[in-house]
Image: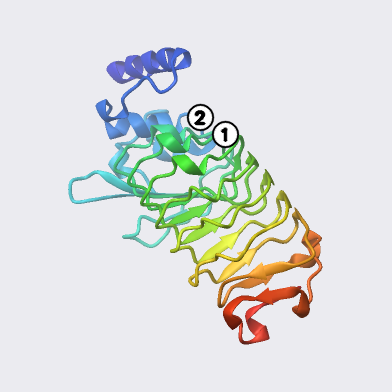
């Protein structure tokens, strides 16, 4: 315990001066996860009863391991835990609040679900585990910008909705295998460029932000089924759509007034009016 305390104390001093100077691969998973949760209000759930002593990280609720005992999945929520192997339990709830340090996550983690915990913090996407295929940090209190260009290249699902992220959102540099993007209900702003979305993308939710300007939807992938854009500041008279079965919702609340005649259908790709919903 003394060795671990000294190690963590040393890390706190060094990293305060030089961000990113520590090689996380040189630290144990135990140390890394303790650094991740150090400032979380609900961290006591990972400790011995009535003490501040952390349990062995492999015994923490909401984590799952591979055959080599590397932690590959993290699923934390205030209303229960799921490891993918057991039924979620509600015997002990995790308290909400505090902050989290996602940059300390070990490289073995491929699934990250930390939701409804009202956790503060920022996200340096370039320092996230490179093997992540799913990120869900929705319904927290994350702030700062969100740089999509730093995301892991194998990422398939990104859910950052209901936080307080701000600034622009670059849609031209998304991971090539991304299928779901949910960034609604933040404080994101700027224009939206839909011209270079991944071909794999199926659903895009960007509602409840402060995006503005006009959109070009001529080059959307046939796999894209849903785009949610309501409650933004978008506006244009005509919208050219170049995809077959995409449903659009909420154009009235964005300031875009569309009628069936104002939409230019490319290659007769939308054969039924039900494929396009204007509400």
Question: In x, y percent, where is residue 171?
Answer: 55, 50
Residue at 34% in and 60% down: 86
Question: In x, y percent, where is residue 133?
Answer: 38, 53
Q: Is residue 165 left or right of residue 114?
A: right
Determine the residue located farthest toward the front in the rendered image.
267
Q: Is residue 278 visible?
A: no
In this rendering, the answer to whether 85 lies above or below 150 is below
Query: Which circle marks residue 39 in the picture?
Result: 2
Q: Residues within 10 Å of mark 2 (few under 14, many from 20)?
A: some
Q: Is residue 91 visible?
A: yes
CB under 8 Å between callouts 1 and 2?
yes
Q: Which residue is mark 1?
A: 98
Q: Considering depth in this image, is 43 or 264 the residue closer to the camera? A: 264
Residue at 57% in and 34% down: 98
In this rendering, the answer to whether 120 lies above or below 185 is above
In this rendering, the answer to whether 151 lies above or below 7 is below
In terms of image quadrants, where is residue 231? Answer: bottom right
């Amino acid at each position: 315990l003394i060795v671990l305390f000294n190690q963590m104390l040393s890390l706190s001093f060094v990293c305060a001066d030089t961000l990113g100077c520590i090689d996380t691969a040189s630290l144990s998973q135990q140390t890394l996860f303790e650094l991740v949760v150090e400032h979380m209000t609900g961290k006591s759930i990972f400790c011995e009863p009535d003490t501040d002593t952390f349990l062995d990280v492999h015994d923490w609720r909401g984590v799952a391991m591979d055959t080599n005992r590397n932690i590959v999945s993290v699923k934390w929520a205030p209303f229960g835990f799921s490891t993918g192997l057991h039924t979620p339990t509600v015997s002990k709830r995790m308290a909400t609040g505090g902050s989290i340090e996602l940059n300390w996550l070990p490289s073995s983690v491929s699934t990250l679900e930390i939701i409804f915990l009202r956790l503060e913090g920022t996200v340096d996407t370039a320092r996230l585990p490179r093997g992540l295929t799913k990120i869900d940090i929705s319904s927290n209190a994350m702030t700062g910008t969100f740089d999509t260009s730093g995301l892991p290249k194998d990422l398939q699902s990104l859910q950052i909705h209901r936080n307080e992220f701000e600034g622009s959102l670059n849609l031209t540099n998304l991971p090539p295998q991304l299928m779901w993007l949910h960034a609604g209900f933040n404080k994101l702003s700027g224009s939206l460029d839909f011209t270079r979305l991944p071909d794999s993308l199926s659903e895009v939710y960007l509602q409840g932000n402060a995006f503005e300007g006009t959109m070009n939807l001529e080059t959307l992938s046939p796999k894209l089924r849903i785009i949610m854009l309501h409650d933004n500041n978008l506006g244009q008279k005509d919208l050219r759509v170049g995809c077959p079965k995409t449903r659009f919702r909420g154009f009235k609340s964005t300031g875009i007034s569309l009628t069936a005649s104002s939409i230019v259908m490319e290659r007769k790709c939308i054969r039924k009016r039900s494929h396009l919903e204007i509400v």
